[in-house]
Image (cartoon, grey):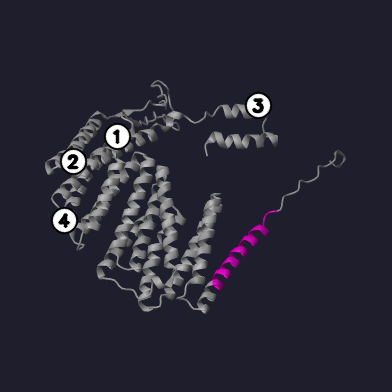
Amino acid sequence: MSNRRWLKEEIPRWVDDGVISEETGKKIISRYKGANIAAYKEAFFILAIVCIIGGIFFLCASLWSGLTQDERFLLGAIPMVISFLIMLSVVLMDEKIPDPISQKEEEEPEENELLSDSETPKLPKKKKITYHHKIPVFIREAAATFHGICMMGGFWVVSDSFKLTSDAYSGLALAGLLLFLLTLVTRSAGMGILYMMVSVGLFYADPVKSWPSLLSWLYMFLALLFLGFMLRDHRDRAVVCYSWVWAVGTLLLIFWSAGNMLWQTIFFSLAASLTWMAGTLFRSYGLGADALRFFGGIAVFAVLLEGSYGTVWAGITGSYALWFIFLLFLALDGVFLTRIAKKKEWLSALAGLTPFIMGLSALISIVDISGALPAMIVSIYTAILGVGVIGRGFQMDRPMQSWCGVFLLVGDGAIRVLDSALSFAQRGLFFLAIGLAAAFISWIFYIATRHKKKPVRPLPEEEEGDR
């Protein structure tokens, strides 16, 4: 909801309550202009680019079957060359232009002004220089993304002409390298998204899961480099799209790498907690960090609810390589957790413990093959995290966050009722423990409200005759 729309709904209530006059309300609304039509220029520009590319694609597809191999190569090369020239011209013409300085330097003290020993001269403030690009961001993104799409089309033409379907991973590995270099030059979010899509496709095209799979993981880790660049430049919208694609791509690699549900859940918990903590560490970067925390929070809640099922932990199997990779990522999670604890972000630190709880449950599941005890441990931790989310929502006056914690508790309780891996006695003990904990918290709130200080009544004034 825009500021103007919110004010148009609230100001009549303020007038009815007598907070402000009707004339004052009209003046407040007049300060906020309506929607600017020029703000939609990016959307129409993107729509135009997509429609033009789509039209050219379908025209070429209609002629494709009647062309010879040389004509197909020519038809695939022309868009790639044209898009490369457009992208190159944009890169060469673009430059960073300093924004006008809004803050003035403080005046330096005069040389003849005597200063006492207790006084120190005021040093001039440093100028905070910000920059903007000469070419608008949507033109830069469109040029880079268009060239990336044309280049992938050129690779497809070569693969289709020489029947390289069974050897597609080699072409994807080379395409990923070229897209990485182009993304490094253009700093384009669209080019980076294509690069990540190729990285995931490289893993999927690997028939025996050998070097292309390892290269795919390396490409996805290198993709974090561009995420750091965009966070530094405060490109919030690009960070949201880019981080979402990176999270989905990483989860796909985890899903394909880990053979069974247990390891998928464990590695999913690592990705979720790292995403949440990364959003907390980059809190000052605005909307992008909020998006990372949002996606990380949803993923942590989902993996905890999944890990609350006993069937996930029944019959653990896995190689030493998976344990080694998990411990390596766990060490990285510990580094993030230490930094979060130093910042006193206790809710994020609590979420960062999720992989450690999953690892502990995995170790216990080696002994308890039924999966009941590991599921119980994850459920108790889920309840603790839910209470933490509710408390943080109350502290920061965020009702939606508090309700998310309530829904997490309700979901955890529903899973405990439906999970067939636990006996009725185990389910009963779980709910008794949760009920006693809730009663204890309620008692603490009761004591806190009971011992509130009573208002001090003012003493009666002494009369003149008593003085």
Q: In the current view of this chain or complex, which residue is farthest to the right?
A: 465
Secondary structure beneath label 4: helix
Q: Which residue is mark 3?
A: 23
Q: CA distance from mark 3 to mark 1?
A: 46 Å
Q: Is residue 132 magenta?
A: no
Distance CA(mark 4)–CA(mark 1): 33 Å
Instruction: Tell which circle, 3 or 1, labels the residue nearer the N-terminal end.
Output: 3
Q: Residue visible at 41% across and 25% down?
A: 104
Within 10 angstroms of label 1, few (less than 14), some, or many (20 or more) residues? many
Q: Disc number at residue 167?
A: 4
Relative horizontal placement of residue 291, taking residue 417 as reference (left or right): left
Q: Is residue 297 left or right of residue 80?
A: right
Provide the secondary structure element on which disc 2 rests.
Answer: helix
Mark 1 or mark 2: which comes first in sequence? 2
Frontmost of labels 3 and 1 is 1
Q: Earlier in the sequence, mark 2 or mark 4?
A: 2
Residue 287 pos. (x, y %): 42, 43
Residue lying at 34% horizontally and 34% vertically, measured from the top left: 48
Residue kind at label 3, given as amino acid type:
Glu
Give neighbour class at mark 4: few <14, some 14-19, many 20+ (Cα, 10 Å): few
Of tags 2 and 4, which is closer to the observer?
A: 2
Magenta span: 431-453
Give the label, 4 or 3, closer to the camera: 4
Question: Marks 2 and 4, Cα distance to the nearest angstrom?
Answer: 20 Å
